Image: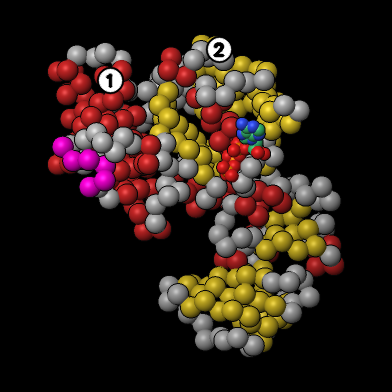
Amino acid sequence: MGRIVLENVTKSFGDAQVIPPLNLTIEDGEFAVFVGPSGCGKSTLLRLIAGLEETTSGQILIDSKDATEVPPSKRGLAMVFQSYALYPHMTVRKNIAFPLRMAKMSQSEIDKKVEGAAKILNLADYLEQKPGQLSGGQRQRVAIGRAIVREPAAFLFDEPLSNLDAALRVGMRLEISELHNRLRTTMIYVTHDQVEAMTMADKIVVLRAGNIEQVGSPLDLYHTPRNIFVAGFIGSPKMNIISGPEAEKQGATSIGFRPEHTDVSKTEGMWKGRVGVAEHLGSDTFIHVHDTGLADMITVRINGDIAVTHGDDIYLTPQLDKLHRFDADGLRMA
Ligand SMILES: Nc1ncnc2c1ncn2[C@@H]1O[C@H](COP(=O)(O)OP(=O)(O)OP(=O)(O)O)[C@@H](O)[C@H]1O
């Protein structure tokens, strides 16, 4: 079990309220991702759930029980820190066993659990090695192993991949998703990387200045962002957002169109511009377009290659059925 409910939770540091009253439910077995720009309160929210920070007001329920005053070690949650939180002088076996030894579990039971976790995480061959002999990804798995053996109601991850290189991040991202598929335990994952959020989450919670801007599945957020902030945050490259006469023509204060929802031609189209940087990836081409009179830069993405280069004229036509319309408050219009 691992259903986590926050009811009117607030957090202030001195006079500064970093989490205004916040309500959120994470269902048992769900993979929830907290995402948002630096300083928006993601880590604070996770630490409140873990019990590493005290709430200023409100309640935290874990499986319907009030956990607001329960100390971290008694909440049944496991926080996975970055891999450097391992003990360098201990073997992998001892690192994974550490929380069980603290809990005074019998040696035979410890061995069973450590070996079970090592199997799940493909670490069985490394149990007698020290963290320094392992790759970054393997170390990260040891950190996860230490959490798994406690059989927590939920795993809490705070940017666990941020100190890994790009290729390893992608690999570990898949491993954590696979682990979730296998264990089906609630996971809460903090990142500022919207690609991680999109690819891992059942439910994304987009935060800005401690406020929840939107909660939904990755594709809900992609297709129907409820405001300009979410529209600009979810999706890569970012949605183009423009205001002025072209938006007014669509009956909106601002309109948004994604790079992948824009038709491109060298001869005709709705708006004319000039190619700035064209990134030819083979599979796709990203073109950054200037001098449209709409915005400093419009980014478009097309499948495959197109023979354009810096300085060429180019014509853009947004796909009107995929246009996002926003009112003067930046809220999505029906
Ligand atoms: N112990 C503290 N004392 C005072 N202010 C704090 C404390 N911890 C966090 N804050 C403030 O609370 C706000 C939210 O911080 P938090 O670390 O939760 O953000 P975040 O979204 O996780 O950011 P990042 O992505 O940069 O890690 C920030 O303005 C931060 O300065």
What is the distance, in whole Å, between disc 2 and disc 1 at their CAs? 24 Å
User: Magenta residues?
Assistant: 128-133
Camera sees residue 219 = no
Q: Which residue is rendered at x = 70% and y = 78% of the image?
A: 290
Q: Of 55 and 296, which appears nearest the observer? A: 55
- Which residue is at a point 68% across and 18% down the rendered structure image? 57
When the figure is inspected, residue 209 is found, relative to residue 296, above or below; the finding is above
Question: Which secondary structure, mark 2?
Answer: loop
Q: Amino acid at mark 2?
A: Glu
**Mark 1 = which residue?**
100
| Whole-percent x, y for residue 101 in the image | 26, 19
Q: Callout 2: few (<14), some (14-19), or many (20+) C-alpha neighbours within 10 Å?
A: few
Q: Earlier in the sequence, mark 2 or mark 1?
A: 2
Mark 1 crowd level (few <14, some 14–19, many ≥20, 10 Å Cα): many
Rendered image coloring scheme: secondary structure
Residue at point 17%, 17% (across, down): 107
- Horizontal side, residue 55 vs residue 171: left or right: right
Residue 242 appears left or right of 45: right
Q: Secondary structure at mark 1?
A: helix
Read off the residue under disc 2.
69
Taking the spot 21% from the left edge, 35% from the top edge, the residue there is 91
| Rendering quarter of residue 261 | bottom right
